[in-house]
Amino acid sequence: MSLLGLLHDYTIQNVAIGAALLGLISGVLGSFAVLRKQSLLGDTMSHAALPGVCIGFIVAGAREMGIILLGALTTGALAALVMLLLTRNSRLKTDAGLGITLSTSFALGVVLLTHIQNMNNAAQGGLDAFLFGQAAATLRGDLWIMGGITVAALALVIALWKEFKLVSFDPEFAASLGMPVMWLEVILTVMIALAVVVGLQMVGVVLMAAMIIAPAVAARQWSHRLEGMVMLAAVIGVSGGVFGAVLSALSRGLATGPLIILSVSSVVMVSLLLAPGRGFVWEGVRLWRGRRRLRYQQVLTTLYRLAVHHADPVFRSEQGMLDTYHGHRTRAALRQLQKRGLVEWRSAPPDEPGGAKHWVLTASGFEEAKRILDSLGQEER
Amino acid sequence: MLASLFDNAALMIMLVGALVGIASSLVGTFLVLRGVSMLSDAIGHSIVFGIVVVWLLTHQQSGPVQIVGAALTGLLTVFLTELLVSTRRVKKDAAIGLVFPVLFSAGVLLLNLYARDVHIDTHTVLLGEIGFVWLDTLTIGDYRVPQALLWMGAMTLINGAFVTLFYKELKIATFDEALAKALGLAPGVLFYLLLLLTSGTAVAAFDAVGAVLFVAFVIVPPSAAYLLTDRLWMMFVYGALVSIASSVSGYFLAVAWNVSIGGMMAVMTGVFLLLAFLVGPRYGMVAQVLRRRGQRRVNEIRTLAVHLYNHEDGPEQWVENVTQALREHLLWDGAKANRVVERSCAAGLIERRGETLVLTAAGREMAREILEPTRNGTGSLTTTVS
């Protein structure tokens, strides 16, 4: 199939649009979830969407996307509420509350799923797609619903941008400004459930949490501003989602959710390694450079001290002596200094025939060593 | 006779369910107490990768090789998560949510690619098939023992031995990690051992309950126990009781409604947790409400006593110390005022003399104690000043 042919394929179109919507909403809303340390709440809510999917199916009697998603939204939000109730009114901590609601509501979903299987309803086959996601099962009608939810959520984020930003970073300050912090937090939490709902069909309940977390974490590495982070998260979510979903639709037999998650997670990997400023690679380079600089500065100041001690600015030091003094090989460091014109590798003077070559400070090396020691002295003072 | 026991499918299923619960809550108790119960979620998911890889390498579907091999994936998850957190680029919650989905996704894709026709399909991965545990047996001596029973029994024994052997160390490491470190108990090593056992249990339980339902068995029974008791060893007892009760009731409900047995067992752990949450003797909601109401009643009686004491013997006592006056002066409505007066009378703190309310000796003593707590030398104010 040619690339152009791909673009015209009906299923591929559906899949790509659906994945783009999913990436968009989960990138944007996930940014807030990650910043507010609610990543695992997304996990709980997505697992808790399963009973809602089943209830929606039972109520509708068929695979009615609207009702199913409404059910998922309801049980997802309900699970967050139960989690809050459990932890506020008992000695259980947040992690236990999350785990309890996650596992028991998923179990309830499993029970309902088997119940539906016993109803011998011909349309029930589509429900399995909600576990791991099945991109190819996306219908054009589903896209309208997913699109509607995405647009509504994005509109809300734009309308309440300032408020959401403040609540995410400094809820106390937001409260002191008279903002309804509790309601804003409720809205943000419910919106995570919205993102979950959009992704159910594509990624499935089990992996949806990662879809909320991963684009936001990747984007966070590249941007220090919320605006940039949210937009980048959306871009990463969309591209990772479309890539994974189209791959799955083409391969037949590979589950969509895992493919999307792996493609988004590889963006996270790359970001963690390479993002300017924060990437591990740059940090490693910085560390290595710093270490190298420290080493040659040490050697430089040693030469300076020797020169001062002997009251001879061009005091000649032997390589072996410097190595012994530092306890490690100093040739590399001296080469660095030589390259910078701070020391010279000078032959023995004519009156000392047969003498070995020596290291000698240049004038600028003398000044530089003095500067380093002075600045050190200032810090100590 | 024993053989007929092993042939009893219902009994085997319930036994396996109970063992999954008991083995899981032995380790789960410490996870819940340390506030890291979501690690069991991560472990439960990521062992899927380990199970598939070990299966591809050795073609062993269960047994010691599978348990140890796949359990290492669980440890790997925790290790990677902590590594990610230690770089300070990612917060702990996000790190958990990043690592296990990757391993889980890789596991599922490998299944899609290589294992389409074997017993592990993606459904089993999530839900397990506890209903069929009695089909897969191993012959030991003259008996055909279900494999799941065997491995779960082994994990229960190992977990039990671990907890018994290191009871003191685990206890200190859980409640006071700094002290454990100072005493040289290596809480870090202990914690990783605990997680290794958690992973092993997850693998052993995998065929029966799958990756996600396992989480319910690890977290929910210990949490329910935590709501019922303050004693560590009692938590194990309650955890085991909840597990057994969930397994038995879950089995019968599932059979009655013809739904997933493993799912129903997990739902039942939730039901028992809810019961503990609502009617637990000390931390339950009902107990909390009752305690609050009791406190409120005591406060009302004390308020009344002080009010009467303040106006006692004064010329205004005929106006102030009547039930009528409580409405305006204490802002109590009529019914409430009557209730408080009734209770105070019953407690022998006040008496009715016609319309007037009079403190008894005991009531007067109580009011004095409230108003002048230092008078009897019990208070600190006078003693510190002098």
Image (tube, rainbow, N blue to C red):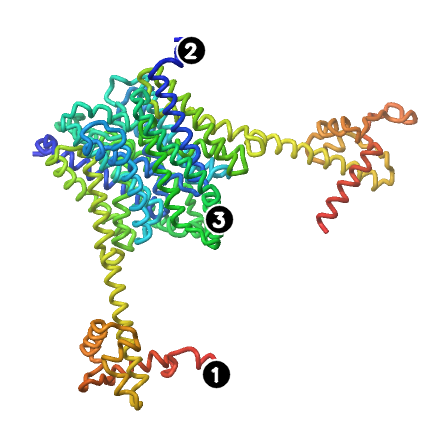
Distance between the alpha carbons at the discs numbered 3 and 2: 49 Å
Image quadrant assignment for residue B230 = bottom left
Query: Circle 1 — which element?
Result: loop
Spot occupied by residue B142 in the image (x, y as percentages of width and height): 12, 27
Mark 1 burial class by Cα count in 10 Å: few <14, some 14-19, many 20+: few
Residue B291 lies left or right of residue A223; in this view the side is left
Give the residue at x 12% y 35%: B257
Q: Are marks 2 and 1 on the same chain?
A: no
Amino acid on which disc 3 is placed: Asp
Spot occupied by residue B188 in the image (x, y as percentages of width and height): 42, 42
Give the mark nearer the N terminus: 3 vs 2: 2
Residue A325's disc is none
Q: Are marks 3 and 2 on the same chain?
A: yes
Chain on which label 1 sits: B
Residue that protrudes farthest toward the top in the picture: A1
Query: Circle 2 — which element?
Result: helix
Image quadrant assignment for residue B69 = top left
Q: Are marks 1 and 3 on the same chain?
A: no
Tag 3 residue: A170
Task: Check the image and report above or below for B169 versus B145.
Answer: below
Distance between the alpha carbons at the discs numbered 1 and 3: 49 Å
Distance between the alpha carbons at the discs numbered 2 and 1: 96 Å
Tag 2 residue: A4
Amino acid on which disc 1 is placed: Ser
